[in-house]
């Protein structure tokens, strides 16, 4: 029996995927548990419509991500830090500070969990950080730590 998965099922398939399973498995487990629906012609048409909507949303999201990446690559972010006399900073610069700097200087809200700083930032200077937007899209951002 062919079915359309409504949600991801381990060892079977992903959401919106059409798979072939045994009749008893589909009728006694997958369909009653709302994991799947029968792959009738009307359900297949609904799946096609859902997939069109999902593709359009992904295209819009991809365009927005490309715009953000272009803005982030334009120019160097400046992050202020308190320093001692030798140029070393007190503490270190974190992804939270970098996220705030992006919000204040570029106008984009980026979750700090998506930011990973390449080197440990303990002194004044220029450093790099990676921002992962998901779906294989990431960028490298340059930032400069300056004395407050």
Image (spheres, rainbow, N blue to C red):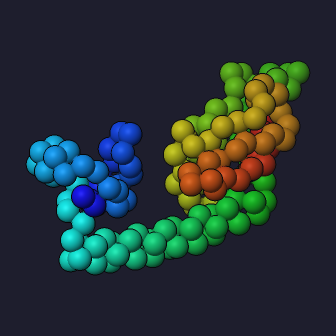
| Quarter holding residue 4 | bottom left
Along the line of sight, which residue is nearer the eye, 96 or 14?
A: 14
From the image, which quarter does the N terminus lie in? Answer: bottom left
Along the line of sight, which residue is nearer the eye, 45 or 88?
A: 45
Residue 95 x/y as whole percent: 62, 37
Q: Is residue 39 left or right of residue 103?
A: left
Tell how many labels.
0
Note whether residue 53 is visible: no
Q: Is residue 77 above or below residue 129?
A: below
Along the line of sight, which residue is nearer the eye, 127 or 34?
A: 34
Note whether residue 48 is visible: yes
| Quarter holding residue 16 | bottom left
Q: Is residue 50 left or right of residue 77?
A: left
Q: Is residue 30 above or below residue 93?
A: below
The structure residue drawn at horizontal position 71% and vertical position 53%, both measured from the top left corner, is 139
Q: Is residue 109 left or right of residue 50?
A: right
Residue 134 x/y as whole percent: 56, 51
Residue 125 x/y as whole percent: 85, 37
Q: Is residue 33 above or below residue 123?
A: below
From the image, which quarter does the C terminus lie in? Answer: top right
The structure residue drawn at horizontal position 45% and vertical position 76%, both measured from the top left corner, is 56
Check the image and name the residue furthest to the right: 86
Q: Is residue 131 left or right of residue 64?
A: right
């Amino acid at each position: 029996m062919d079915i359309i998965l409504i949600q991801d099922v381990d060892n079977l398939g992903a959401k919106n995927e059409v798979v072939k399973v045994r009749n008893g498995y589909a009728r006694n487990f997958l369909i009653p548990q709302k994991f799947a629906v029968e792959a009738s012609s009307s359900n297949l048409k609904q799946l096609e419509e859902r997939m069109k909507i999902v593709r359009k949303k992904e295209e819009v999201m991809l365009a927005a991500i490309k715009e953000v990446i272009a803005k982030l690559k334009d120019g160097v972010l400046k992050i202020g830090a308190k320093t001692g006399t030798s140029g070393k900073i007190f503490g270190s610069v974190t992804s939270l500070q970098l996220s705030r700097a992006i919000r204040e200087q570029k106008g984009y809200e980026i979750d700090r969990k998506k930011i990973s700083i390449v080197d440990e930032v303990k002194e004044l200077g220029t450093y790099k950080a990676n921002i992962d937007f998901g779906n294989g899209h990431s960028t490298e951002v340059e930032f400069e730590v300056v004395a407050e």
